[in-house]
Image (cartoon, rainbow, N blue to C red):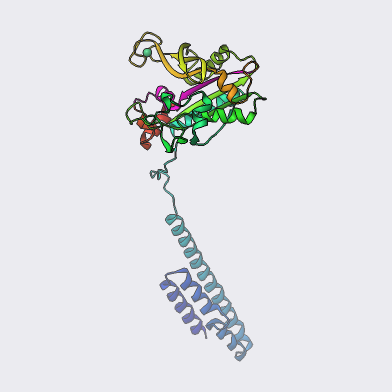
Amino acid sequence: MKEKVENLLNEAKEKLNNANSLKEVMDLKVLYLGKKGPVNELTTHLKELSSEEKKEFGKSLNNLKTTLSSLFEEKIKYYEEKELNEKLTSEQIDITLPGVHVPIGVPNILEKLIEEVEEVFLSMGYDVVDGPEIEEDKFNFELLNIPKGHPARDAQDTFYLEGEEILLRSQTSPVQIRTMLENGGTTPVRMICPGKTYRRDADDATHSHQFMQIEGLLVDKNISLSDLKGTFDVIVKKLFGESCETRFRPSYYQFTEPSVETDISCFVCKGKGCSLCKNTGWITVSGAGMVHPNVLRNCGYDPSVWSGFAFGFGAERLAMLKYGITDIRTFYQMDLREIEAFNRKDVD
Ligand SMILES: [Zn+2]
């Protein structure tokens, strides 16, 4: 009997030594120490022995069980740790490896400038208004005091879609007309309209057949040219810095009277003269003026009671000046690397 116990122990030890995985060890444990295993089988022989032998054999059986149990537990612990370590190693993240670059989009520079202008006007109580790009002649020309036969209506300049009545708007001013008509000649208007406009220009560095205007209109009682000057000062100082000076020069537009061209002091040479300002010290940034009485009347506003001013910026021109862009086509053939570079300029 003693021999059997020893043989069993040696056999189990040998098998355990040859086991190569946690699973194999677990299987061996069930095989030897399970209910139907050889250790339990030996226990059944106890009853065949004398009480003296029973005592001794019982003791050695207990020893066998304890020894085997601790051997198995030791080996199980070994493999469990080994597997855990292997898992940790295989799942380890090397934080010193270079990361994967995920490109992040940046806003189009023109869109960004328009939003900047919108913010300034919104803070002064203006509404941002939208309107159709396919327009009727009456809104684009007629009601703006541009009668039939006026050179601005020339088919050389305007994209007509159907006869002479439907066209691609050549300015955003029709949105001003629509807004005034909606207000019915009875309530003040404060609005800006940034939007696409179309003219039959051949594309080159300074011309584009499609470009963005930012037009604005204020109609109220007792509005004068000095209100326009004050508003113009606010927006250009916001865009080009507090040291930016402004001046008005007389000009002529059909829909304003008087009309002005608005200049800002050259922010490159500070007035000394450079190529940007063509040595004048001044840069023209918009056209503006007091709303023509005919236009007010066309939209239901009595010019003896109401007055107002209107202005129009070319969004591309503003962005070109602000970001030092020399070719208008840059905005419409956008190279993503260029957009990123302009945005970086803004952050700097
Ligand atoms: Zn200059």
Q: Quadrant of ligand 1?
A: top left
Horizontal arrangement in the rendering, residue 175 relative to residue 329 (left or right): right
The vertical placement of 18 against 159, above or below, is below
Could you tell me if residue 100 is visible in this image? Answer: yes
The vertical placement of 257 against 6, above or below, is above
Query: What residue lies at 32% left-to-right and 29% top-to-bottom?
Result: 204
Q: Position of residue 150 (x, y in %)?
A: 43, 24
Q: Position of residue 125 (x, y in %)?
A: 62, 24
In this view, the residue in front, 274 or 253, is 253
In this view, the residue in front, 319 or 167, is 167
Q: Which residues are magenta?
A: 306-326
In this view, the residue in front, 277 or 8, is 277
Query: What residue lies at 63% left-to-right and 18% top-to-bottom?
Result: 306
Horizontal arrangement in the rendering, residue 63 relative to residue 188 (left or right): left
Q: Is residue 102 magenta?
A: no
Toward the right, the furthest residue is 186
Quadrant in the picture for residue 347: top left
Q: Position of residue 271 (x, y in %)?
A: 40, 9
In this view, the residue in front, 221 or 91, is 221
Toward the front, the furthest residue is 149
Q: Position of residue 221 (x, y in %)?
A: 65, 17
Q: Looking at the figure, which quarter contains the C terminus?
A: top left
Query: What residue lies at 55% left-to-right and 17% top-to-bottom?
Result: 231
The count of marks equals 0
Could you tell me if residue 266 is visible in this image? Answer: no
Q: Is residue 315 magenta?
A: yes
The vertical placement of 221 against 148, above or below, is above
